[in-house]
Image (cartoon, rainbow, N blue to C red):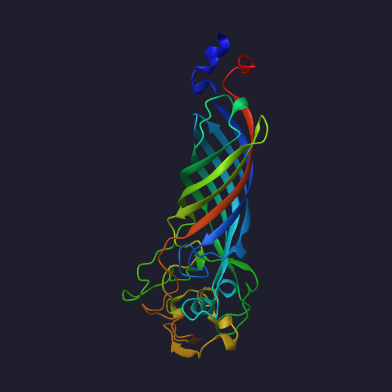
């Protein structure tokens, strides 16, 4: 009778918690993707990420999981874009922008199992598909490798180093722009952002206290600056430093055979810059990036270890 009552006492007597560790893969979708579509990514830039999680199962199908992950996103026009594609790839290749972004994210995720598990952790189902949704807060900091020289040919002190792009204001964030400029009113973007994670996967019982999870999901962000690219080029003369100018316009780093004829223009700082037509100077038509929000994909393999239950184990033996 005691055993019978235990099985009918409701799931609150069968809840349990677990710690987990995961090996993940990050993929980036944004302005420095091979093609201007939301589904375009360069698989060669897949980068590993490490995650740690704590989960609590509180219903026959429901699990709440808190997770911290650390990983890197990367992209590069010169490596991803197809120079032989006259529609899109050629122009992305000639833009020649690149970045890396080390992401530190904290997620709170709600999981819903397809197969119900109305029993103790000892008799949980062998496997179940699931979906999840939640909220993610993350810290990001886009960087790029500094070239050897600035746009005038002078050596850069930061040459060959990864430099933070946000403080440079590569799209005029820290510059004085005219009201008629395409990027007029632009503000610095925050390094602290929020995303909506959505995904699906399957969980497998390995033994009495260990589960294996395999899942894939997307982080839909509210920023277009994971790659430091979003709007138009600005007049190079308004940028605040030689480094900012060199990181804003990078087409000059390509070989002469990969570039059309350069044209000089007199910038607002009184200097003359030689740039590709359509790049590196102020115009509503000189687009550096799109206004679509960036996305990143997370693929995960996770092991969780059950650390306890709220019921008396002996009751179910």
Q: Residue furthest top?
A: 1
Figure check: 292 above or below 306: below
- Position of 277 with respect to 299 (left or right) is left
Q: Residue furthest left?
A: 179
Image coords of residue 189 (percent x, y): 44, 60
Residue 307 falls in image quadrant: top right
Q: Nearer the viewer, residue 13 or 61?
A: 61
Q: Nearer the viewer, residue 269 or 198?
A: 198
Figure check: 308 above or below 94: above
Residue at x 56% of width, y 10% of height: 2
Residue at x 49% of width, y 52% of height: 219
Q: Nearer the viewer, residue 57 or 205?
A: 205
Image coords of residue 249 (percent x, y): 51, 77
Q: How many marks?
A: 0
Residue at x 49% of width, y 43% of height: 131
Residue 242 falls in image quadrant: bottom right
Figure check: 302 above or below 90: above
Quadrant location, the N terminus? top right
Image coords of residue 185 (percent x, y): 35, 67
Image coords of residue 243 (percent x, y): 55, 74
Quadrant location, the C terminus? top right
């Amino acid at each position: 009778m005691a055993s019978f009552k235990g099985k009918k006492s409701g799931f609150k007597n069968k809840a349990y918690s677990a710690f987990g560790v995961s090996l993940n893969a990050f993929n980036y979708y944004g302005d420095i993707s091979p093609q201007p579509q939301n589904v375009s990514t360069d698989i060669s830039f897949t980068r590993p990420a490490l995650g740690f999680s704590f989960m609590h199962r509180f219903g026959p199908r429901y699990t709440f999981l808190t997770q911290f992950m650390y990983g890197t996103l990367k992209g590069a026009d010169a490596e991803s874009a197809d120079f032989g594609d006259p529609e899109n790839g050629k122009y992305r290749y000639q833009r020649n922008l690149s970045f890396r972004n080390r992401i530190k994210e904290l997620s709170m995720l709600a999981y819903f199992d397809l197969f119900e598990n109305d029993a103790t952790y000892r008799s949980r189902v062998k496997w179940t598909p699931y979906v999840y949704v939640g909220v993610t807060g993350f810290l990001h900091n886009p960087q790029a490798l500094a070239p050897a020289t600035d746009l005038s040919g002078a050596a850069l002190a930061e040459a060959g180093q990864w430099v933070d792009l946000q403080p440079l204001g590569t799209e005029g964030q820290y510059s004085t722009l005219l009201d008629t400029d395409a990027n007029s009113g632009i503000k610095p973007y925050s390094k602290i952002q929020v995303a909506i994670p959505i995904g699906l996967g399957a969980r497998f019982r390995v033994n009495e206290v260990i589960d294996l999870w395999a899942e894939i999901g997307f982080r839909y962000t509210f920023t277009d600056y994971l790659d430091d690219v979003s709007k138009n080029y600005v007049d190079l003369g308004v940028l605040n430093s030689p480094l900012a100018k060199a990181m804003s316009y990078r087409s000059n780093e390509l070989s002469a055979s990969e570039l059309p004829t350069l044209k000089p223009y007199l910038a607002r700082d009184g200097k003359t810059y030689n740039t590709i037509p359509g790049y590196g100077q102020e115009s509503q038509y000189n687009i550096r990036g799109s206004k679509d929000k960036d996305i990143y994909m997370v693929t995960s393999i996770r092991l969780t270890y059950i650390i306890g239950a709220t019921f008396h184990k002996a009751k179910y033996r």
